[in-house]
Image (cartoon, coloured by chain):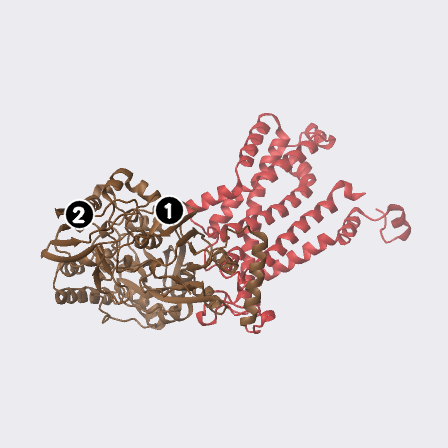
C-alpha cells in the first residue's frame, strides 16, 4: 500500500475516488441545500415532542385563527392558531412526522417490490422479463391518484391504509430503472466470470449486481419519496387521507381553504413547508444522481 | 380594519375581473337578481327532492292551499279561501276562483284531487313520504269545493298543507310527470321558471298574473340562480358584482363580509338542530352507548355554549331537546347537561371504562363542528376514528344500524311541530337507534291526538325520558347568514326559506 500521507505519492496517484466524490458533493449546491433541509426536517420530526411549544391536539375555541407573529400575532402562538384554536406551529411540527413517515415507508415498500421485480427481469430475461414488463405496463396504465382515491374510499382513510396503498402503487419507476440497469450490468465480464466460477445466483445478484445499481436506486428512492409525500397531501386535502385530528400538511391546507380569501396564511404556511420539503428531496435526488453518475466522475 | 379589507376585496375583485369572463352584470338596472346555491338540486319537482334549495324553489314556483305567515305563524288561505274540519279525518276547502297556472291552465278542484291522489299513492315514490302519507285521497264536491280525506287523525295537517304540499296542474302533470315537471316546472306561484338547465342555472321570472295571494306580489322581475359549490368563489363573485345574494355563508366568512362597504349580512335562526345520535339500542353490535352512564358522559363532555359562541355564532342557541324550541310540543323543561368533563370521566369510569374507549365517529356536514366535537370527546377519553361521509351514504349506513355514534342535523322541513323531528326518529323507524317502547307509545298518542293539551302532555313525557336517558346529545340550533348587496332589500325569516317575493331593490 502506498502511504497516502506522502505528498509525492498523493500527487502521482491523485485523490482517491472517495475524496473525489466528497469534493463533487460539496461543490454541488442543490445537493447541499437538499440534504440540509431534509436533515433538519428529519430532526424536527424525531424531536417533535421536545420542539412543539403546545399540544397539537389541544383545542381552544375561544382563540381561533389567531394570526401568526409576522401578521400581528403574539409569540404565544408564533405561527398562529387554526380554525379550532390549535397551535399552528405545533401541528406543522407533528405534521412533518406524518409526511416523512409516509414518504419513507411508502418508498421503502415500493422500493422492495420494484427492485425485486426489476432485477429479476433484467437478470433472468426471457419469460420472467416478459411477465414483469407486462406488469409494469399494466401498472403504468393505471392513474395513481384515481386508484388511490378508489381504494382509500373503499377501505376508509387512515395512516396505515394510505401508506400501504402508496407503497403498493409507486413501484413502477423502481422496476423500470432497475430492469434497465440490471440488463446492462449482467452482460459485464465480471458477472460472466462469477457465473463461470460457479457462484450462486443470489450471490451474484447481491455482490456483483446490486452494488452497481445502488446509485440509481438511491435516486429513485428520493424521487418516489417526494411523490408519496405529495400524494398523501393530495389525498388528505380531498378528505380521504390521514383523518383528523392527526395533523397532516395536506389536511391543514384543506382546513384552511375555506378561509383562504380572508386568512391566506392558513393555506400558505403548510403549503410553503410542503413545497420546501418536496423541493429539497428532489434537489437531493438530482444532486445524488449528478454526483454518482459515471459521466459526473470525470 | 375596514380600510384594509376594502382594499383587499377590491384587489380580489380586480384580479377576478381580469381573469374570468363575467356573465352579464346583473343589478338593479337590468332588474335581475343573481343568486348562488351551494348544492345541486336533483329535481326541481318539489315532491322529488329533499333539499333546502328545493324548498326555496317550491315556495317561489308553486302555492299551497294554505299559507302560514312566517312572522306571525298565522294560517291564511292561499289557493283555498276557507277550510273546515267536517270530522276528524275530513277537511273541506273552498277554492279561490280565477287562478291560472303559468301555462294558462285554470286552477280548480280537479287539480287538487289529482295532486293529492298522485302524491298520496306510495308507489309514485314521493321522496319524503312523511310529508304526504297522512293523506288518503281527495274528493271533488263541485268545481271550487274539495275534500281531503286523511288516513287517521292528524292534527298537523294544516301545517303540512301550508308547507310541503303544493298544488300541481292535473292535465300538464299527467302528461309531463315528475321528470317533465322538473325540467319545465308549471305552478301558480309568484315566479315562473323560464329556464332550467340542471347543473348550470335556474331562471325565474315574475308572474305578472299572480293572484291576490297572502304571499304578496313579486317585485324583482328576474331571478337567476346558479350553482356554485365553493364559498370562496361565491364571495369573489359577490365582490365582482356578478352575484347579488348568497346565503348559508359560514360564520367566519360572514363576520369578515359584515365589515365591508356595500354588503349587508343578515343572520337568522333556522329550525335545524345539531345532535349526536348514539346507538343505544345496540344495533351496531355490543357498543358502549348501550350503557346509560356512557351516554350521559358524552352529554357532559360537550361544551355546547363554547360551540355556539365560537363556531356557530349568530342566533344559534344551545338545546337539550331533540326538536326545535319553537315547534309545537317541544317543551324545554328537560334534563340539562352542563359542560363538566370531570363528571364525564367519572361516569365513564363508573360504567367500566376508566381509560375510555375507541369508537367509529361519523359525520356528513360541517367538518369543522364535527372536529371540534370529537376533540371534546377525545378530551374525556373517548377516542374517535373520524369518518366523513356523504349524506346519502351515512343515511344508508344508519338505516342498516351500523353507526355507533354520529353527528347529525335535522331541519324538520321548516314544519313548526315537534312531530316533524321527534316522531321522525323515535318511532322505531329505520333511522331510530333508540327503539324505546315507552317513547313510541307516548309519541303515538301525541301525534294523533287533536287535543293540544293532551299532545303537550305526551310530548313532555317522551322528551323528558329521551333527555333523562340521554339517548341523544342534542347540542345546538343552526343559523343562516344571508349576505347581499346594499342594493337589495330583504329581511330573512326564521325558517331557512329564501323568499324572492319578499325582496326588492333599494
Q: Which mark is residue B109?
A: 2
Query: Most extreme residue toward the top, as rendered?
Result: A126
Marks 2/1: CA distance?
Answer: 26 Å
- Residue A45 pos. (x, y %): 58, 60
- Relative to B306, say whether B40 is above or below: above
Identify the residue shown where x is 49% and y is 41%: A147
- Relative to A104, say whether A170 is above or below: above
Q: What color was chain B assigned in the picture?
A: brown
Query: Dot 1 surroundings within 10 Å: few (below 14), some, or many (20 or more)?
Result: some
- Residue B240 pos. (x, y %): 52, 58
SS at badge 2:
helix
| Of residues A20 and B32, the one drawn nearer to the viewer in this rendering | B32
- Residue A119 pos. (x, y %): 62, 35
Residue B288 seen by the camera: no
Identify the residue shown where x is 58% and y is 37%: A116
Q: Chain of mark 2?
A: B
The quadrant of the picture occupied by the N terminus of chain B is bottom right
Q: What color was chain A assigned in the picture?
A: red
N-terminal label among 2 and 1: 2
Residue position for label 1:
B194
Amino acid at each position: 500500500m502506498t502511504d497516502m500521507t506522502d505528498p509525492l505519492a498523493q500527487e502521482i496517484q491523485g485523490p482517491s475516488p472517495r475524496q473525489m466524490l466528497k469534493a463533487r458533493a460539496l461543490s454541488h449546491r442543490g445537493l447541499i441545500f437538499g440534504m440540509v433541509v431534509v436533515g433538519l426536517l428529519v430532526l424536527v420530526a424525531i424531536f417533535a415532542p421536545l420542539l412543539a411549544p403546545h399540544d397539537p391536539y389541544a383545542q381552544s375555541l375561544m382563540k381561533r385563527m389567531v394570526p401568526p407573529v409576522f401578521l400581528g400575532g403574539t409569540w404565544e402562538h408564533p405561527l398562529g392558531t387554526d380554525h379550532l384554536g390549535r397551535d399552528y406551529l405545533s401541528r406543522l411540527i407533528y405534521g412533518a412526522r406524518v409526511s416523512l413517515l409516509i414518504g419513507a415507508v411508502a418508498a421503502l415498500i415500493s422500493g422492495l417490490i420494484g427492485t425485486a421485480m426489476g432485477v429479476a427481469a433484467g437478470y433472468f430475461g426471457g419469460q420472467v422479463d416478459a411477465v414483469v414488463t407486462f406488469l409494469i405496463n399494466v401498472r403504468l396504465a393505471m392513474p395513481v391518484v384515481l386508484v388511490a382515491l378508489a381504494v382509500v374510499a373503499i377501505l376508509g382513510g387512515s395512516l396505515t391504509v394510505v401508506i400501504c396503498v402508496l407503497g403498493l402503487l409507486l413501484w413502477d419507476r423502481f422496476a423500470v430503472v432497475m430492469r434497465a440497469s440490471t440488463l446492462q450490468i449482467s452482460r459485464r465480464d465480471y458477472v460472466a466470470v462469477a457465473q463461470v466460477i460457479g457462484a450462486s445466483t443470489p450471490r451474484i445478484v447481491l455482490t456483483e449486481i446490486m452494488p452497481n445499481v445502488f446509485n440509481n436506486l438511491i435516486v429513485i428512492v428520493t424521487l418516489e419519496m417526494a411523490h408519496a409525500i405529495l400524494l398523501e397531501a393530495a389525498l388528505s386535502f380531498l378528505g380521504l387521507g390521514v383523518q383528523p385530528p392527526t395533523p397532516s400538511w395536506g389536511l391543514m391546507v384543506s382546513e384552511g381553504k375555506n378561509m383562504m380569501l380572508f386568512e391566506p396564511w392558513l393555506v400558505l404556511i403548510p403549503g410553503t413547508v410542503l413545497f420546501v420539503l418536496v423541493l429539497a428531496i428532489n434537489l437531493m435526488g438530482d444532486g445524488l444522481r449528478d454526483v454518482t453518475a459515471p459521466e459526473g466522475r470525470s | 380594519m375596514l380600510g384594509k379589507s376594502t382594499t383587499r376585496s377590491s384587489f380580489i375583485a380586480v384580479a377576478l375581473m381580469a381573469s374570468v369572463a363575467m356573465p352579464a352584470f346583473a343589478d338593479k338596472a337590468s332588474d335581475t337578481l343573481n343568486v348562488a346555491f351551494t348544492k345541486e338540486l336533483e329535481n326541481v319537482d318539489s315532491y322529488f327532492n329533499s333539499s333546502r334549495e328545493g324548498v326555496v324553489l317550491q315556495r317561489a314556483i308553486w302555492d299551497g292551499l294554505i299559507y302560514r305567515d312566517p312572522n306571525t305563524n298565522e294560517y291564511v288561505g292561499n289557493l283555498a279561501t276557507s277550510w273546515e274540519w267536517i270530522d276528524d279525518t275530513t277537511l273541506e276547502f273552498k277554492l279561490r276562483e280565477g287562478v291560472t297556472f303559468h301555462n294558462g291552465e285554470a286552477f280548480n278542484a280537479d287539480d287538487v284531487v289529482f295532486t293529492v291522489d298522485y302524491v298520496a299513492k306510495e308507489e309514485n315514490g314521493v321522496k319524503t313520504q312523511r310529508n304526504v302519507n297522512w293523506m288518503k285521497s281527495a274528493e271533488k264536491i263541485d268545481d271550487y269545493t274539495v275534500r281531503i280525506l286523511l288516513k287517521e287523525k292528524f292534527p298537523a295537517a294544516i301545517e303540512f298543507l301550508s308547507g310541503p304540499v303544493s298544488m300541481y296542474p292535473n292535465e300538464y302533470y299527467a302528461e309531463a310527470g315528475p321528470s317533465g315537471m322538473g325540467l319545465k316546472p308549471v305552478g301558480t306561484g309568484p315566479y315562473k321558471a323560464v329556464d332550467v338547465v340542471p347543473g348550470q342555472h335556474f331562471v325565474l321570472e315574475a308572474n305578472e298574473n299572480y293572484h291576490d295571494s297572502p304571499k304578496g306580489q313579486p317585485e324583482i322581475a328576474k331571478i337567476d340562480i346558479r350553482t356554485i359549490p365553493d364559498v370562496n368563489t361565491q364571495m369573489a363573485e359577490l365582490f365582482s358584482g356578478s352575484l347579488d345574494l348568497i346565503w348559508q355563508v359560514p360564520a367566519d366568512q360572514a363576520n369578515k363580509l359584515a365589515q365591508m362597504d356595500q354588503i349587508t349580512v343578515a343572520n337568522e335562526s333556522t329550525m335545524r338542530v345539531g345532535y349526536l345520535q348514539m346507538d343505544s339500542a345496540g344495533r351496531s353490535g355490543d357498543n358502549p352507548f348501550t350503557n346509560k352512564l356512557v351516554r350521559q358522559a358524552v352529554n357532559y363532555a360537550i361544551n355546547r355554549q363554547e360551540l355556539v359562541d365560537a363556531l356557530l355564532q349568530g342566533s344559534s342557541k344551545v338545546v337539550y331537546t331533540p326538536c326545535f324550541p319553537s315547534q309545537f310540543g317541544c317543551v324545554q323543561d328537560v334534563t340539562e347537561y352542563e359542560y363538566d368533563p370531570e363528571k364525564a370521566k367519572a361516569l365513564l369510569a363508573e360504567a367500566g371504562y376508566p381509560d375510555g374507549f375507541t369508537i367509529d365517529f361519523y359525520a356528513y356536514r360541517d367538518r369543522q363542528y364535527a372536529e371540534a366535537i370529537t376533540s371534546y370527546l377525545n378530551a374525556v377519553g373517548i377516542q374517535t376514528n373520524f369518518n366523513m361521509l356523504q349524506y346519502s351514504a351515512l343515511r344508508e349506513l344508519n338505516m342498516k344500524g351500523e353507526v355507533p355514534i354520529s353527528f347529525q342535523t335535522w331541519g324538520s322541513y321548516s314544519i313548526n311541530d315537534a312531530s316533524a323531528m321527534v316522531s321522525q326518529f323515535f318511532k322505531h323507524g329505520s333511522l331510530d337507534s333508540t327503539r324505546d317502547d315507552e317513547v313510541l307509545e307516548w309519541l303515538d298518542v301525541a301525534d294523533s291526538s287533536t287535543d293540544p293539551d293532551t299532545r303537550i302532555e305526551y310530548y313532555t313525557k317522551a322528551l323528558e325520558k329521551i333527555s333523562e336517558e340521554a339517548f341523544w346529545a342534542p347540542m345546538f340550533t343552526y343559523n343562516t347568514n344571508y349576505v347581499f348587496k346594499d342594493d337589495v332589500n330583504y329581511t330573512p325569516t326564521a325558517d331557512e326559506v329564501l323568499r324572492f317575493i319578499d325582496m326588492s331593490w333599494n
